[in-house]
Image (cartoon, rainbow, N blue to C red):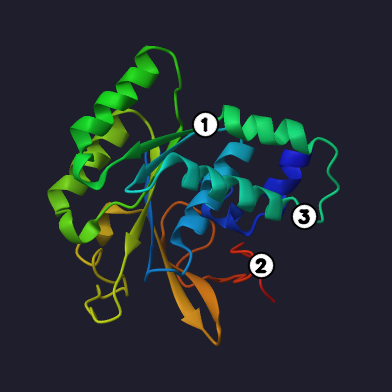
Amino acid sequence: MLKKDLVKNNPLRILSPAPGKDSPDCSMGVVISRAGLGKTAVLVQIALDAIFRGNKVLHVSIGEGLDKAKVWYDDLFHEIIKGQSVENVTDLGDDIRKNRMIMTFKESAFSRPKLEERLNDLVYQNIFRPDCVVIDGLDFAGADRAALEDIRELMTAMNLHVWFTALSHRDDQRASKNGVPAPCHEMEDLFETVILLQPQDGGINLRIIKDDVGSAGAGRVLPLDTATMIVTEGK
């Protein structure tokens, strides 16, 4: 019951397939923002929502250690369950750990072949079979379109949904005609969902620029609580 309530009350439920809309075998989403605005926090909340829905999630952390990723999950989980009528929090925490695996790469060591090799090891040895992969820290400025197409090909072959974070820069004003900022402005068509985090009136807004999978549609805005880094429904 608790997981159903968490899914029902999660503002990010709008990123899931709309009623009557079939879920694709593979989709790619990206959370874009300048440094320090909450990309990783949003990515982890997307991952937690997937787990609460009964999926297994592989979290790929590039350039950061295992412990730091675990802290994000622990801290955000405890914020999410605050104020809930919770009887089985310990069991739910165990469920998260059972259905989530964290994989780390050094920035110079990440590539589609390396990711594929490690994914195959997990799957073929029956260690862990993810339904969703979240990739935090990919250098989009240094990754060309072919590299993203290569990853998409892998995710499609394995029937996996994948989310990325991408770092934008204040002094780079390039953007697609639909408002997708650099460094993803020339790769917009590769993503079904594009989210932009922006400072707004002393806070941070999550703006959905593109949504071909969920029920939100482009233009939807959700506030990010700067104290907890939790996405909220807003007013």
For label 1, count other residues whose C-alpha is less than 10 Å away and answer few (under 14), some (14-19) or many (20+): many
Above or below, 45 against 133 in this view is: below
Q: Residue at x 29, y 72 (%)?
A: 181
Is residue 201 visible in the rendered structure shown here? Answer: yes
**Residue visible at 64% across and 70% down in the picture:** 227
Query: At label 2, which amino acid type do we have?
Result: Glu
Q: Classify mark 3: helix, strand or loop.
A: loop
Which quarter of the image is occupied by the C terminus? bottom right
Residue at the far top: name it. Answer: 125
**Label 2, label 1: how many angstroms apart (C-alpha)?**
25 Å
Mark 2–mark 3 distance (CA, rounded to whole Å):
16 Å
Which of pointers 2 and 3 lies earlier in the amino acid sequence? 3
Residue assigned mark 1: 56
> 10 Å neighbourhood of mark 3: few (<14), some, or many (≥20)?
few
Where disc 2 sits, the SS reads loop
In the displayed structure image, the side of residue 118 where residue 108 appears, left or right: left
Which three-letter amino acid code belongs to the residue tagged 1?
A: Lys
Circle on res. 82 = 3
Q: Nearer the viewer, mark 2 or mark 3?
A: 3
Q: CA distance from mark 3 to mark 1?
A: 24 Å
Residue kind at label 3, given as amino acid type: Lys
Mark 2 closeness class: few <14, some 14–19, many ≥20 residues within 10 Å: few
Q: On the image, numbered disc 2 is attached to which residue?
A: 233
**Mark 1 falls on what kind of element?**
loop
Residue 115 is situated, as x and y percent measured from the top left of the image, at 27, 33
Q: Nearer the viewer, residue 196 or 72?
A: 72
Disc with the residue nearer the chain's start (2 vs 1): 1
Specify which label sits upstream in the sequence, 3 or 1: 1
Report which quarter residue 230 is drawn in.
bottom right
